[in-house]
Image (tube, rainbow, N blue to C red):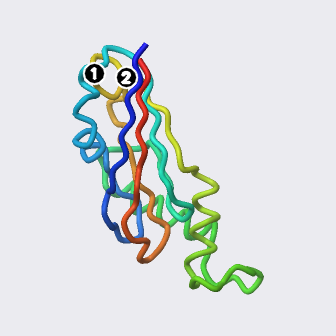
Amino acid sequence: MRVEQHQWELGSFPRGFHLITDRVSYNLPWLSSFEKGLLHLHLLHTSASLAINENADPDVRIDLQTIFDLLVPEGNPEYVHTIEGSDDMPAHAKSALLGPSLVIPIRGGRFALGTWQGIYLCEHRNAGGPRRIVATAIG
């Protein structure tokens, strides 16, 4: 069994759901040497998350943002954690709903994703800043 691990920075993204499959693949050139296994991706932040969803129609990303903003709106007067801005507590809640990690099967040195699946960075802050990911492959 082989284990590889790598950490990198994605850079900053505006608030929203961003397809990052190609960026993840670019940062893991050694993945092509894994015939089969599992890839674990972990985002080292509490106000953004990772998800797998539709990779073809960009309207899905807009609708996901709309849905999450309706589920966890900014400006709720019942929020206690407000010191970091009105978008911070909602960002933590959205991150808790989606989670910071993904496990993706590896087959033939590539992500074993469905035809219409892609990896998303879900940026829940208006200006979240650079985001770091740790990738661990076991195979």
Viewed as shown, does residue 11 lie left or right of 47? left
> Alpha carbon of mark 1 to alpha carbon of mark 2: how far?
6 Å
Tell me, yes or no, whether the two marked residues, 1 and 2, touch with CB atoms within 8 Å: yes
On the rendered structure, is 66 left or right of 19? right
Q: Residues within 10 Å of mark 2 (few under 14, many from 20)?
A: many
Tell me where residue 17 appears, x and y as whole percent: 40, 59
Pick the front one: 111 or 6: 6
Q: Whole-percent x and y of residue 73?
A: 61, 75
Q: Residues within 10 Å of mark 1 (few under 14, many from 20)?
A: some
Q: Secondary structure at mark 1?
A: loop
Residue 18 vs 104, above or below: the answer is below
SS state under label 2:
strand
The answer to whether 33 is drawn above or below residue 137 in the figure is above
Looking at numbered disc 1 in the image, what kind of residue is underneath it? Answer: Gly
Instruction: Give the side of residue 134 with respect to residue 89, left or right.
Output: left
Image location of residue 86, percent across then percent down? 58, 84
Identity of the residue drawn at 22% across and 42% down: 26
Which residue shows up at 59% across the image and 62% down it? 94
Q: Name the image quarter holding residue 36.
A: top left
40 with respect to 30 (left or right): right
Instruction: Count the numbered circles shown.
Output: 2
Residue 109 numbered tag: 1
Residue assigned mark 2: 106
Task: Assign the C terminus to one quadrant of the image.
Answer: top left
Question: Residue at (59%, 69%) from the top-left corner?
Answer: 70
**Residue flagged by tag 2: what amino acid is it?**
Ile
| Quadrant location, the N terminus | top left
